[in-house]
Amino acid sequence: MTIAVSCGEPAGIGPEVAAKAWALLRADLPMLWIGDPRHLPAGTPWQAVEEPADAAVVCAEALPVLVRDFGPSVTPGAAHPAHAQGVIDAISTGVDLVRSGACTAICTAPIHKKALADGAGFAYPGHTEFLAALAGVDRVVMMLACDLLRVVPATIHIPLAEVPQALTARLLTDTILITHAALRRDFGIDRPRIAVAGLNPHAGEGGKMGLEEIEMMGPVLDALRAEGIDLSGPLPADTMFHAGARARYDVAVCTYHDQALIPIKTLDFAGGVNVTLGLPFVRTSPDHGTAFDIAGKGVADPTSMIAALRMADRMVSLRGAGKRTFSAPISARKSDPA
């Protein structure tokens, strides 16, 4: 049950939280770190391995490392352009290991998108889109999850001004269908309850504050309800995230990035996990960035990395043991406008 862990940005806290996670989990949850061991915190016990199968044995005493040479030394807090290709290759290697069956899942440490673009011409907005390209799938969904809440932003890393145009009926339909299928297959929820946030304040308030809920979102949700999906909404986003409201759904589908991420980071800033839904393999990631400001200081909190590893392990178990190959109803797609 070895999980591949890509190193992430070497100048950030990725190597530190991976090392701390290993120290707390060890053989209880075998992991294989892919990167340059020179970037691990000083004093980290590590051992080079050639095959992922060896990691389970090594993990009890040392962090198993699939060694890669990134060239120049690292300066905490300052990304080096020469490291960019190594970071990208570590992700690709991890995906290859999972797709071949050598590892069960991939957990990715945070990357710095600008550093990758500057150093290696990285053309993707982030991990999510890059993983979709590696997997050869057209559309994936980003979920942020913790014990108190799961959220899915339908649009992700785009300017707020572009959200109304980007939020199409097809995008909303696909997001809900992928989310529904993943909750059944990867989270063991046979009949997921999905709440959908409106785009406008008060979900448009009957058209006084916007028409997207009436003209596009409502018809999409009605069509999916007719397919048997348990949906509520479009709902006013400002009343969706208190404790009583959260008890009425299993996931909240939101219309844009901050609408989804602000509530979950408020509820559990340290323990949130980023999960990519719709991939043919399991991928999780800690829900934080590179944290250049504290890199190299030994104070990074590994809670989110540990939560990401544990969630990946649970998802793999559900996929394997539960034979959950459910797919959401898809006939609604046929009549949905683009």
Image (cartoon, grey):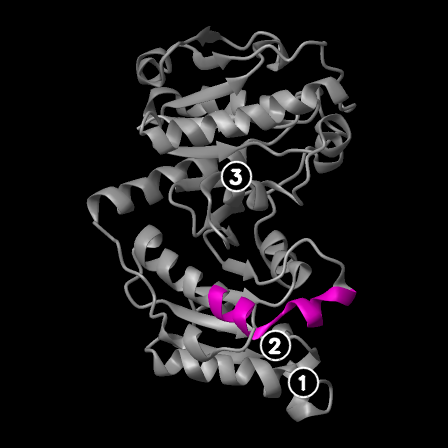
Type of amino acid under label 3: Ser
Determine the CA span between mark 3 and mark 2: 27 Å
Mark 2 — residue? Answer: 198
Is 192 part of what is drawn in magenta?
A: no
Type of amino acid under label 2: Gly
Q: Earlier in the sequence, mark 3 or mark 2?
A: 2
Question: From where the camera sits, is residue 80 visible?
Answer: no
Please say if the residues under marks 2 and 1 sit with CB atoms less than 8 Å apart: yes
Q: Is residue 35 above or below residue 266?
A: above
Is 167 part of what is drawn in magenta?
A: yes
Mark 1 — residue? Answer: 204
Instruction: Say which element carries label 2.
Output: loop
Of residues 232 and 171, the one nearer the viewer is: 171
**Residue 14: x percent and y percent?**
61, 27
Instruction: Say which element carries label 3.
Output: strand
Q: Quadrant of residue 188?
A: bottom left
Magenta extent = 161-174
**How many neighbours does mark 1 have within 10 angstroms: few (below 14), some (14-19), or many (20 or more)?**
some
Q: How many marks can you see?
A: 3
Q: Is residue 262 left or right of residue 282?
A: right
**Residue 157: x percent and y percent?**
68, 53
Mark 3 — residue? Answer: 285
Q: Is residue 106 above or below residue 138?
A: above
Of residues 302 and 279, the one nearer the viewer is: 279
Type of amino acid under label 1: Gly
Residue at 35% across, 37% down: 313
